[in-house]
Amino acid sequence: MSATTAKSPAREPGGTRQSGGRKKLSYPVVLLIIAGVLLALSALRALTGANDLTSSGQYSGALAAAVPIGLAGLGGLWSERAGVINIGLEGMMILGTFGAGWAGWQYGPWWAVVAGIVGGLLGGLIHAVATVTFGVDHIISGVAVNILALGFAQYLAKLLFGKEGSEAALAGGNDKQSPPMDSLGTFNIPGLSGWLGSIERHDWFFVSDSAGILRGLVTDVSWLTLLAVGLFFATFYILWRSSFGLRLRSCGESPVAAESLGVNVYTYKYAAVLVSGGLAGLGGAFLAIVSSHFYQDGQTGGRGYIGLATMIFGNWRPGGVAMGAGLFGFTDSLQLRGGGETVHGLLLLLAALLVALMVWGLRSGRLRQALTAGGIAVLLTAWYFFTDTVPTEVVDATPYVATLLVLSLAAQRLRVPKAIGRPYRKGQGK
């Protein structure tokens, strides 16, 4: 008998598993983390007077802002899990906004949903043909899709909506936007929204704050938001609980090994990129249908790139993408609501997090990282105590600053699919 035996992953008390030296959080630990975040936000709101930190309006706006970003990130996850880098998410979202704007004006909001998905699928098909069939560099192809989609949408908008005296122009369209469409409608959970609202108005510490956050997530929710939540659960089940998902992910890890087991790698890569485009197109359709009720030039505002950042932050996992989208949706809602006082209060929270990072850096021997975190924490604390608010320009830049900060922190723990971006040709392993 060999003296060397393989060690199975250790299981911590409470269901936490260690695999490769890394711990998986159990559900009780996750719930404790959520409670800790709620407590921190409640304390910060009470200390700073920034009531928007836990108001229902802030989180209702955050949910609406998170959905298109999350759908774009989910689209990127599908593509990159199959080994195809998808920088073209922004362009696919643009095609989705245009398709939804045109079909929504002509046939109503549900047809706008279908047209938005089809627009994104067309962008995904172009990217798949270029990268999978012809072996074009994935970055170059994605940038080309973004440029082509922008020009295509602008040209068609002038052609279909901007002609003087046309039906579209008379209905309110022009060369920058489509005529408005009917509302898709929203729903509330019966009884729950009003009950939470009454608790929120009592201004009880933690209890009213939690009620305000929950009320924002269950009040005036779009049907497309419900569809997006379902797509996150469906993605997890398909990619991690089905044989189809196992084969698709194997194409992003080792396409040669997948081919040796009888997997048609081209088919799975095409399917992944098409689904990716459809999800990004649905995210663009959400902007046209729910956020504004019409297509508008520049409507995506870089959300495809932020969606790509959520995918990286989420480590190519649906749950991580959802968390990242929620974070960016929160900062985006701050920007839209003009939350100068709220961002000012968040300076104190960020300083506290940096102090914790400093302590962790000192304990782990990372002196340079600890000193950098401590220095920034001092500057943020001084900024908070010597000012009453932050400039509008800082508020407007909050989503993009959050993107950079999150990516810089997430870079420490990323596990990229091994064959991502690599060219593949059938039979290359023989």
Image (cartoon, rainbow, N blue to C red):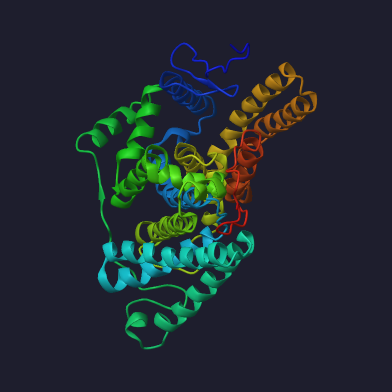
Q: Horizontal placement of 390 versus 379: left or right? A: left
Instruction: Tell which of 333 and 373 is nearer to you.
Output: 373
Instruction: Tell which of 291 and 266 is nearer to you.
Output: 266
Residue beneath the point at 49% across and 60% down: 300
Q: Position of residue 90 (x, y in %)?
A: 53, 60
Q: Position of residue 34 (x, y in %)?
A: 45, 25
Residue 182 shows in this picture: no
Residue beneath the point at 51% across and 63% down: 128
Residue beneath the point at 24% across and 33% down: 192
Residue beneath the point at 62% across and 57% down: 423
Q: Quadrant of residue 403?
A: top right
Q: Quadrant of residue 210?
A: top left
Q: Quadrant of residue 209?
A: top left
Q: Position of residue 280 (x, y in %)?
A: 45, 57
Q: Horizontal placement of 323 versus 99: left or right? A: right
Q: Position of residue 177 (x, y in %)?
A: 43, 72
**Number of marks in the image?**
0
In the image, residue 164 above or below residue 141:
below
